[in-house]
Image (cartoon, rainbow, N blue to C red):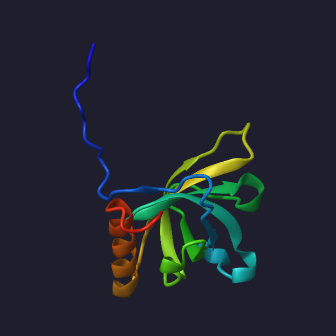
Amino acid sequence: MMTAYQPEKRRHHRIIFKEPKKIAALVSLLDQEQENEAVASSILNMSAGGIQISVERSALDNVWRGREILLHCVSGLPELLELADVPMQVVWVMDNEYLDHILIGAAFAALSEEQERILRAFVDNCLNNTQRC
């Protein structure tokens, strides 16, 4: 039995980072926003609307849908150095008690016009293969 093609229901196209290209971010809960309290995470994919990250379970407690977190910085992508100190809202959390990491999907809550322009240009360049992503 064949199923009809159903387009993705996302608002923004995602860039999925392959394993050899390690992209990292420092994040913290918004009420613990001191950079020395930030934890390292791996960015698994990104769009103009948000990111999906993987974080060690023990590093980031009390994360739930609707919680605000702060993206301190992104490393591994020099094009996105301006993507710093961005508040995000957790959209979903995937937490399997048998795994060491949790997955978090977060939407950018407040990007400056310049940050939005840089992020859109990065995503467009990746989608058009004019940049290695």
Task: Look at the image and tell me in which quarter the N terminus lies.
Answer: top left
- Residue at the image position 54 percent from the left and 82 percent from the top: 85
Q: Position of residue 9 (x, y in %)?
A: 29, 46
Which of the 4 image quadrants contains residue 119? Answer: bottom left
4 versus 113 height, above or below:
above
Which of the 4 image quadrants contains residue 61? Answer: bottom right
Judging depth in this view, the residue of 99 and 63 nearest the camera is 99
Judging depth in this view, the residue of 128 and 30 nearest the camera is 128
- Residue at the image position 54 percent from the left and 73 percent from the top: 77
83 versus 11 height, above or below:
below
- Residue at the image position 29 percent from the left and 57 percent from the top: 11
**Is residue 39 rendered to the left or right of residue 2?**
right
Could you tell me how many numbered marks the image carries? Answer: 0
Q: Position of residue 42 (x, y in %)?
A: 63, 60
Which of the 4 image quadrants contains residue 114? Answer: bottom left
- Residue at the image position 74 percent from the left and 76 percent from the top: 37
Judging depth in this view, the residue of 81 and 103 nearest the camera is 81
Q: Position of residue 83 (x, y in %)?
A: 49, 79
In the orientation shown, which residue stands out farthest toward the left? 4
**Is residue 103 rendered to the left or right of residue 80?**
right
In this rendering, does residue 48 appear at all? no
In this rendering, does residue 11 appear at all? yes
Judging depth in this view, the residue of 110 and 130 nearest the camera is 130
Q: Position of residue 89 (x, y in %)?
A: 48, 65
